[in-house]
Amino acid sequence: MGGSFQALATAQGEEFVRECVLALTRAGFEVVGERVDLVDTGCEVDLLARGATGVVFYIECKGSFMRRPGLQRTDTLRKAIANMALIHHRGYGPLMLMTSHRPAGACCGRRARSCG
C-alpha cells in the first residue's frame, strides 16, 4: 500500500467523519457545520449538528481502522479530552465525542475517561 502513515491516517479520519455524518443523519440530527474553527479556543470541531429539539452539538470524531484505532491511541484520547475541555471552558456545548473504538483494557485512556 503506497503513501505515508500520516496520509493514510488523514484519509481514514476523513472517511470516519463521513460515517459520523451518516449516523447522525439517521438518528435525526441535521449537520449544520463541518470543520468549524472556534477561534477563541484554538480548536476546530469536526461537526456541528442540530438535534430534534433544536440544540446544536459540537462534535469531535475520532476514528480509523489502523492498528490502534479511535481512542485506543493514548495521544488521540488526550487530544480529544484537551480539545473538549477548552471548548467547554469557552462556553460551547453540548459536546459529543464519536469514536470507532473505545480505550481498551487498563490503559491510561480508560483511567482518564473515568476521571471527574
Image (tube, rainbow, N blue to C red):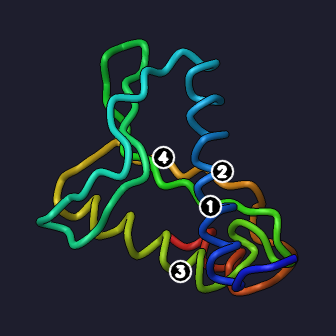
Disc 1 from disc 4: Cα separation: 16 Å
Q: Answer left or right for 31 relative to 76.
A: left
Q: How far apart are marks 4 and 2 (CA)?
A: 18 Å
Give the residue type at disc 2: Glu
Q: Position of residue 71 (x, y in %)?
A: 68, 69
Distance, label 3 to label 2, CA atoms, is: 21 Å
The numbered mark at residue 95 is none
The answer to whether residue 41 is above or below residue 51 is below
The x and y percentages for residue 91 are 18, 53
Q: Which amino acid type is shown beneath numbered disc 4?
A: Met
- Label 3, on which residue? 78
Query: Residue most toward the left?
Result: 40
Ranked by sequence position, the earlier of labels 4 and 3 is 3
Q: Quadrant of the N terminus?
A: bottom right
Neighbourhood count class around disc 2 (C-alpha, 10 Å): few under 14, some 14–19, many 20 upward: some
Q: Is mark 3 on a helix, strand or loop?
A: helix
Residue annotated with mark 2: 15
The reply to whether dot 2 and dot 1 touch (C-beta < 8 Å) is: yes
Numbered badge on residue 13 = 1
- Above or below residue 42? Residue 58 is above
| Local secondary structure at mark 2 | helix
Q: Does residue 71 appear left or right of residue 82 in this picture?
A: right
Looking at the picture, which amino acid does disc 1 mark? Gly
Kindly indicate the quadrant of the structure image that contains residue 115. bottom right
What residue did someone put label 4 on? 96
Which label's residue is closer to the chain start, 1 or 4? 1
Give the mark nearer the N terminus: 3 vs 1.
1
